[in-house]
Structures are given as C-alpha cells and as structure tokens.
Image (cartoon, rainbow, N blue to C red):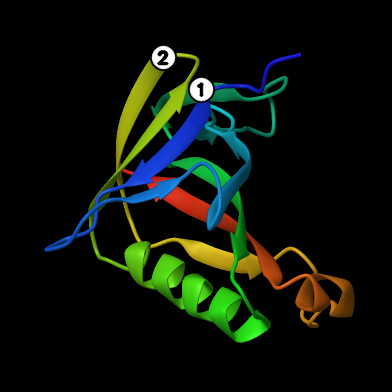
Amino acid sequence: MADLDARVTIARLGGSALVIEDAPFELIAVGTGARTWRRTTVEGKYQHGRALVGAVLDTQQLTVQVRCRGASWIAAQNRVNELIAAVSAFSYGVTVEIEGHRQTFVCEPADVTPMSGDVIDKHRAMRSMQEYTLTIPVVM
C-alpha cells in the first residue's frame, strides 16, 4: 500500500518555505476544521424558539499535527523552535496539498500545543522527536 501524498508548506517571510512532509518535519495529520457560523438571534417572552437576525462565517481553524525529529533531543527542540518561529508571524501563507489537490490559506499566528501535554514524554525524548499540534486561524 502506497503512502498518502500529503504535505503542508509554510511560507516564511524573508526565508525559504518550511515543508512539513517527511523528516525532519513529519506530517502526522492535517484538517481544515469545521465551518461554523456566528449567529445573531432574538428571543422573546411570547415567541417560540428564536429568530435569526443575521449570520456570518466564523474564523476557520487549520489543524496540523507535526513530528519534529533530530539527531538528538536538543536537535529536535531546535526544529520545534524553527517551526514555532515559522507560525508566529502576524500573517503568512500555508499551502495544504493532498494527492495533488492544493489549498492555500492566509493565516494568523498559530497556537502550538505539545501532543504529550505539559510534560516531556521520555519515550519521544529518547527517540529524539517531539510532536506538536498547530491550531492556525485562517483569514477569510
């Protein structure tokens, strides 16, 4: 069975793009999140339910799970720092490509969360890797 052809490319200001696909930045998972609405409604004492006054699309989230590898745990941490710097810009582009289908997003600074929680997982550290979830707000 062939691997899924998928990659995430982060355009860095003043530098080369950071490609998340294989080592040292391995793509674990990617998703564009739900399409949700911010609704303005009114409710009344003598009204069943509510009435919709207006609705606009809410900010969409791009979720990317990344495994950062290195020759040592410190080298993996340096990769994490590189990844965090790439997604900390006020505005940057992210391209998601899966099996030839390409979507490009303009993004805001990402929230970066360790997949092991608030602790350093000794098994990941011994294997010279760290895994993070990027939650990236997408500009409409």
Instruction: Point out residue 133 in the picture as x, y percentages from the top left corner.
Output: 62, 57
As drawn, the label of residue 1 is none
Gap between marks 1 and 2 measured at Cα: 36 Å
Residue at the (36%, 72%) spot, across then down: 85
Instruction: Point out residue 41 in the picture as x, y percentages from the top left corner.
Output: 52, 32
Q: Is residue 22 visible?
A: yes
Q: Are marks 1 and 2 in contact (CB under 8 Å)?
A: no
Check the image and report above or below for 98 versus 37: above
Check the image and report above or below for 105 versus 12: above
Residue at the (46%, 51%) spot, across then down: 136
Q: Nearer the viewer, mark 1 or mark 2?
A: 2
- Residue at the spot of label 2: 101
Instruction: Point out residue 56 in the picture as x, y percentages from the top left corner.
Output: 39, 30
Tell me: 31 left or right of 78. Answer: right
Label 1 secondary element? strand
In the picture as drawn, the residue positioned furthest to the right comes out as 123
Badge 1 amino acid: Leu
Task: Classify mark 2: residues with Cα within 10 Å, few (<14), some (14-19) or many (20+).
Answer: few
The part of the image, by quadrant, that contains residue 132 is: bottom right
**Quadrant location, the N terminus:** top right
Tell me: 121 left or right of 22. Answer: right
Task: Classify mark 1: residues with Cα within 10 Å, few (<14), some (14-19) or many (20+).
Answer: few
Badge 2 amino acid: His
Camera-nearest residue between 56 and 40: 56
Residue at the (59%, 86%) spot, across then down: 74
As drawn, the label of residue 52 is 1
